Amino acid sequence: MRIEFLGTGGATTTPRPGCHCKICDEAREKGVPYARTGPSLFIHGPDVLIDTPEESAIQINRAGIDRIAGCFYSHWHPDHTMGRRVWETRNVDLRGWPPEPQRTNIYLPEQVARDFPERLGLQEHFDFMSRQGTVQVIELKDGISVELDGVEITPFRLAEDYVYAFLLVEAGIRVLIVPDEMHGWSPEQAPFPLDDLELAILPMGVTEFNVFTGVRQIDRDHKVLGMEMTFHDTLDVVQSLGARHTILTHIEEMEQLSFDELRELERKLHGEGLDITFAWDTMTVDVPG
Ligand SMILES: [Zn+2]
Ligand SMILES: [Zn+2]
């Protein structure tokens, strides 16, 4: 399988509209890999999309993706779902009569399916697209796996238990994808052992301390520290997972780390024995198997 990072930003994209910090101005001037759209990735092979941020339609075009066998939603948060109208723009048949829309399978893990009626008008919108014939919503009870083109995909809950991670297995090769919200989680909480991972894809976390100088940059009373995993804690997860390779994504503009600074941070982490890459929009990685 080949994994493509369609978007590597977080709740905020880089650049942010109207922001003239150095990170945003550089992203505006240079584009990718300095610019980041919302969090989403695509698994070529089974042709599976994970999450639809606002830029989803643009991302899918940019990547030249034609076939999408299904989309898994990790949780209801707007940065992961607000591009959901892509299913209409991609699949609707406005000219034909009777219309013959394409239809995409939408896989909702159990709690995500429970949250859709309560959050952001998600249920109403997916009901609308279901009637239109552009989506088919499939709820996955916890513990259920889906197999697509030889890849077994198992969603499971994190400590923030409205959020799901995904274990992908193809011919014994194992890949962990955690799209977001790793706060309070450690690998031993998973419902099955997460050993022998070829690749782990994790959210970067909040840099409570400057990654180069160690100086505190977020007030210790700031509520974000009670809600989000810190970068430091993320590195603990990286170490305890012990995956052959780790890619960090969901990189917020507020981290104020440019593409070049993240490269420099990679070198520093390599020096500490950690094989980590920071993802960028359009990055692809081939997973053997
Ligand atoms: Zn997010
Ligand atoms: Zn900015």
Image (tube, rainbow, N blue to C red):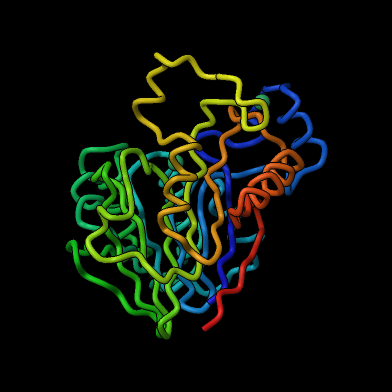
Residue visible at 30% across and 45% down in the picture: 122
Q: In this view, does 26 lie to the left or right of 4?
A: right
In the figure, 110 relative to 36: above or below?
A: below
One can see residue 85 in this view: no
- Expressed as whole percent of the image width and height from the top left, the position of residue 253 reads 61, 32
Asked whether 226 or 152 is in front, the reply is: 226
Asked whether 12 or 249 is in front, the reply is: 249
Residue visible at 49% across and 45% down in the picture: 235
In the figure, 118 relative to 254: above or below?
A: below
Q: Quadrant of residue 241?
A: bottom left
Residue visible at 34% across and 63% down in the picture: 106
Residue visible at 51% across and 84% down in the picture: 289
One can see residue 112 in this view: yes
Asked whether 276 or 134 is in front, the reply is: 276
- Expressed as whole percent of the image width and height from the top left, the position of residue 284 reads 64, 65
Q: In which quarter of the image is residue 268?
A: top right
- Expressed as whole percent of the image width and height from the top left, the position of residue 77 reads 37, 40
- Expressed as whole percent of the image width and height from the top left, the position of residue 230 reads 46, 34
Q: Is residue 132 left or right of residue 189?
A: right
Asked whether 121 or 150 is in front, the reply is: 150
